[in-house]
């Protein structure tokens, strides 16, 4: 058996499923990554990919950017972990507060799921209420509160059937409300019905790749203020990518708290809760015993190595006008894909902002998760497979992340590949 095949077998034996999360590959397509550089990634068996996954988003300036690598190396020589307040964490916190409209203060955690989890804990402690409203299809990580409302098309507030993962207590499900994204009327009905016990509304301002309808985020801000709930933006994807100040800057809506991650760690484990200081002050040890003090701690919170990588990444983004550069690359990609679809008379759209748009094999408007889920997912999946075959690393039925490292030549090659991939999808009879 070739060495690479042995490694693939061992990966599945040692790590159940042979994957770290929920994204796997069809039989015969799994590979083991060896290294990344710029917008490319190499496998142990010699494959070379143009990377549109980018570590699930963090590598916004590309893999192994020299300034980021140098910052990591310099900090590593000073210590990889200190478990106390440190200079580089303070500097990164200052940059976040300067850039993000809602950020009066910052608390660091180790990953995005912890950021959304602690945001919800803060909201419950601050308001003295228990219920959380989220949106169908909104992904806020792996914790128990987040694993609800991820099955499409079940209607408003369908959590009575329970969570979307085993091992989650029914009592937690009872505290979750689910509304359809972009439906302000249905959301308002739920909010007002549960106003006296609603602690928070949590939302991805751009839900996966679905943009907010005009006035939707503004309406959520008004509803939260009306009933005294905390508005939380999950800006794990949009933060420092859609705009340097995130979706808050793009859409002109300021939440009470936001969850940040991916970009701010520069590819190392780091995330943060940013927002109102009066809320984040509930994490201060030794504060007056009023029943609202929350426990927030973690061995690697504020890790200086991750903060160094994140700070360097933000500096590179600032210097390169990163969000604009990434959006321009995304527009080039989207225009190429759309032109190819038109040439083949294929129903197609690129859904979402250009910096992380998603190929969809339908021309119908998509405003929520249920509509997304019925927009020919079989064609989208096969398209992903065909793009992988042609040397493009993509997540199946998901957004394409762009970076400042993607070159015009790489994007043009991907566009050429998309023509062949679309033709293959059409010839397999997947377009209806």
Image: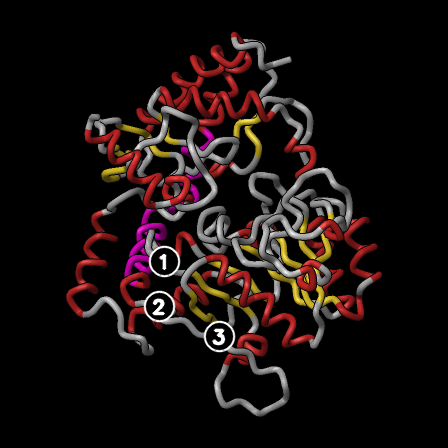
* Residue 311 shown in magenta: yes
Tell me, for residue 235, which label it has, or none.
Answer: none
Main SS class of the magenta portion in the image: helix
- Residue at 74% across / 41% down in the picture? 154
Image quadrant containing the N terminus = top left
Image quadrant containing the C terminus = top right
- Residue position for label 3: 296
Magenta segment: 308-331
Question: In this orientation, does residue 319 appear?
Answer: yes
- Residue position for label 2: 300
Task: Tell which circle, 3 or 1, labels the residue nearer the N-terminal end.
Answer: 1
Q: Label 2 crowding class (10 Å Cα cut-off): few <14, some 14-19, many 20+?
A: some
Say what secondary structure mark 2 lies in: loop
Farthest residue toward the left? 77
- Residue position for label 1: 269
Between residues 38 and 379, which one lies in front from this camera angle? 379
């Amino acid at each position: 058996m070739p060495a690479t095949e042995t490694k693939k077998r061992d990966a599945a034996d040692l790590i159940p499923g042979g994957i770290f999360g929920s994204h796997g590959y069809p039989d015969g397509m799994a590979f083991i990554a060896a290294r990344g550089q710029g917008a490319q990634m190499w496998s142990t068996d010699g494959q070379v990919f143009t990377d549109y996954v980018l570590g699930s988003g963090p590598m916004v300036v590309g893999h192994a950017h020299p300034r980021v690598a140098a910052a990591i190396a310099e900090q590593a020589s000073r210590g990889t972990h200190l478990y106390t307040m440190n200079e580089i964490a303070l500097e990164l916190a200052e940059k976040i507060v300067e850039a993000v409209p809602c950020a009066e203060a910052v608390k660091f955690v180790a990953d995005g799921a912890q950021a959304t989890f602690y945001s919800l804990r803060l909201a419950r402690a601050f308001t003295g209420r228990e219920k959380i409203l989220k949106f169908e299809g909104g992904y806020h990580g792996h914790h128990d509160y987040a694993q609800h409302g991820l099955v499409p098309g079940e209607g408003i507030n369908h959590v009575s059937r329970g969570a979307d993962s085993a091992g989650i207590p029914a009592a937690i499900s009872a505290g979750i409300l689910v509304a359809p994204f972009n439906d302000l009327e249905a959301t308002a009905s739920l909010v007002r019905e549960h106003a006296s016990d609603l602690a928070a509304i949590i939302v991805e301002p751009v839900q996966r790749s679905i943009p907010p309808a005009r006035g939707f985020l503004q309406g959520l801000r008004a509803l939260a203020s009306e009933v005294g709930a905390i508005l939380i933006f999950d800006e794990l994807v949009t933060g420092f990518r859609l705009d340097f100040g995130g979706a808050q800057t793009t859409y002109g809506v300021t939440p009470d708290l936001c969850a940040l991650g991916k970009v701010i760690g520069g590819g190392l484990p780091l995330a943060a809760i940013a927002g109102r200081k009066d809320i984040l002050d509930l994490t201060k040890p030794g504060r007056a015993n009023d029943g609202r003090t929350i426990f927030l701690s973690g061995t690697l919170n504020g890790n200086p190595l991750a903060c160094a990588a994140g700070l360097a990444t933000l500096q590179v983004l600032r210097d390169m006008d990163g969000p604009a550069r990434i959006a321009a690359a995304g527009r080039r990609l989207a225009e190429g894909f759309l032109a190819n679809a038109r040439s083949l008379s294929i129903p197609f759209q690129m859904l979402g902002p250009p910096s992380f748009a998603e190929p969809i094999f339908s021309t119908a408007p998509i405003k929520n998760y249920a509509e997304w889920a019925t927009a020919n997912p079989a064609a989208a999946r096969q398209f992903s497979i065909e793009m992988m075959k042609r040397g493009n690393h993509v997540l199946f039925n998901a957004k394409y992340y762009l970076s400042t490292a993607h070159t015009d030549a790489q994007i043009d090659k991907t566009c050429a590949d998309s023509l062949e991939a679309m033709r293959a999808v059409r010839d397999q009879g997947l377009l209806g």
